[in-house]
Image: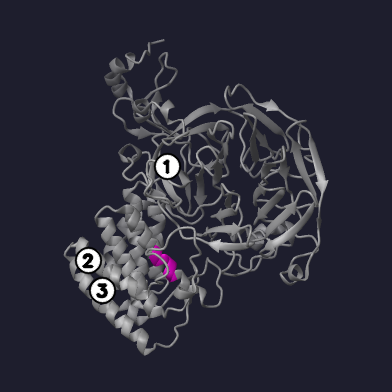
Amino acid sequence: MSSFEIRQPTLTLAIIGRVSKASTMTDQAQVLFDQANWQNAAPLFLQTCTLFADHEQSLPGVPGHEIRTKHFENLHPVEIAKYALAAGFLAQCHYHEKRYSQALSWAEEARVVWSNAQWVNPPLFDWIDFNITLPDMTRAMMLSQIVASKTFEALGNTSAASFCLSRAMSSYTSIEGRCENHDNNEQVQALYNTELTIEKMVRLWKLRHPDPRLVSSISVQDPTLQVKGAWVKRKDTGSFARNDFASFVWKGRLYIAGGKSTMDMTKIFECITGEVYSIDLQTFDSWHREAPWPYRNREKFFGQTMVIHREKAWLVTGKKRVDYFDLQTKQWGSIMTTFNRTAADEAAGVLPWPWTGSLREYAIQAREGKLYLFGGTDNQTSIGNNFLMELDLDTKRWRRLSGYPIPTVGYTIPGPRRYSSSWISKDSSKMYLTFGDANRPGGLAEYKRFSGGVSEPHANEEAYSPIDFWHWDFKKEKWVRERWAGNFPCPRTETSCVYNPKLDQVVMFGGYHPSLNTLIDPPGHNFTFSFFADTFVFGAPDPSNPGVLDPRWRHVITRSFPTPRCQSQIIVDPETGRTFVFGGYANLEFVPYGNAVERSRVFGDVWELRTDMPGGFYDEVDEEDEDRNARMGPWRKCYHCGSPSATLKKCGGSCNGGVSFCNNICLKAGWKEHKKDGCRKI
């Protein structure tokens, strides 16, 4: 990863005075901290933060507001380093006293003030690493990410734990060897030598997310950060498998449109479909073939999303023609749209028509007669753009709200990406946006053979998944970058995300990180990416926790879960509030799956999520059965000893493989008890 050293303005006497006072208080607090006197150390660290804080804002900052502030930007880098270091130590104090919510809030405060130091300098793409050549700054960022990693791990959020520890290492390596005062700083080196050892890194890299070996030991410790849940497998559709498809729910039926049925690159184009199928979400009887997309014989329908508005499911492909599936007649139709390029559009590099070729991998939402599209790829860029485009369905006219057609750097809008997650707020005043990836490898010459074989600017072998959280204010027509709150997911792309109006919660499942290491057996088998099967919700905590009003992320603690995957779709039946996930794919070297010889597998299973909150259907969960017979993707738990494995033997009795055993020894030992469940030999 390339790095960038930011500028350092002149110190004034006032700044020197504040920094001197902060150093004295921090030294006093650290003496207490080293004695494990967290209770008395915390107030001194808080006083240090107060020296540099914006007194019109609460400490730490609250969610929902812009994290880029004039106050932070006007601080000298030395002040920022002192503030961030005190915030990191304060997070440590809260962690040691198991106040996990406060620990995560203060770790995020350190990251926020550190980010403001970057934003006063010339813009950089997020994938370019940066640091300040001050040992206290490096130490602060290492410390805050280390404590965030420990806190996430204590809460069972192993993907975020692994990511934060990797970020702590990046904070060190971004400056290592380039600055003598870092190399010789005993405190920086001590933190590196004790907390960033290869043993600690490897321990987290060996975990899956969730990890079948750990799920039984994870429980809800803080209901403002976690919620109980259960994934229930409702149907395995066998040969009907899809990834990179579009989906929607209408009147109790799940519709699947387009997508791919294989990841085998020798068959990929013949397995792209324009067919549409639906299935009843109560009976799950069989898939019903609907009217196919009329352009399937000359255009490829994959990597595109559909959204329901005005009793039509809309499909944008980047052409002037916008298609829709009429939900009353069950037939396809289309409208022709226009785009009037303004002088501002032209200055931003926008062509007379915004996209060239097919537009894919974008985020789309609908609101008040308009469609909103963000990001995606077309013939102009495989890395991703950061267009925010609006289509008025009455005038049939497109309008650019922000962004550029090719990767362009800036701090006031989300960066270029594809496969981002988005949703509209309950009051329709905001559109939230997060995650996705800048597909920098896709911009390399060897992947551009269909468009001239020339690498794009900013192409690189390593993809980047951003750790940012934005909302678009529809009234002000402005992007606002928010802080992370709660027990949030680590960055990921190709994840599935949906707003559930019955729960008033956003639900996020799965995805993958393109550069987060995973080590699996046999030893030394290393993947430079990670697939996920963890689940999160975002919204106000349930009414049983009235003391916490701000929306925040919570990790859904489940015993069972679908196979780790990306490019699945999570959908909600708006009439019942039931949440389902369908499809997606995974690398079979990463996820063991029987005797499969293909490198990847596309899934055709349907799972339902139940959560322990009002309207979450958790009353239908048999917790005892869930604990004992958890289905963790390809892994199952032995009915007798509880060991998880992907190679267990299913019971051959009348339960039809409802439970599994390690071997004949466990079968013999557990058979007497299993007979009480009603199973009989066949």
Q: Is residue 461 visible?
A: no
The image shows residue 358 at horizontal and vertical percentages of 74, 52
**Residue 598: x percent and y percent?**
56, 39
For disc 2, the neighbor class at 10 Å (few under 14, some 14 to 19, many from 20) is many
User: Can you see residue 349?
Assistant: yes
User: What segment is highlighted magenta in the picture?
Assistant: 109-114
Q: Quadrant of the C terminus?
A: top left
What residue is disc 3 on?
26
Q: Report if residue 282 lies within the magenta region.
A: no
Q: Using the image, tell me which numbered label, if any, was put on residue 41.
A: 2
Disc with the residue nearer the chain's start (1 vs 2): 2
Q: Main secondary structure of the magenta part?
A: helix
Can you tell which quarter of the image residue 675 is in? Answer: top left
Tell me which corner region of the image, top left, top right, bottom left or bottom right, holds residue 229. top left
| Mark 1 or 2, closer to the camera | 1
Mark 1 lies on a secondary structure that is: loop
Query: Which label sits on residue 542?
Result: 1
Q: CA distance from mark 1 to mark 3?
A: 38 Å
Give how far across and how far down residue 479 sits, in percent: 59, 62
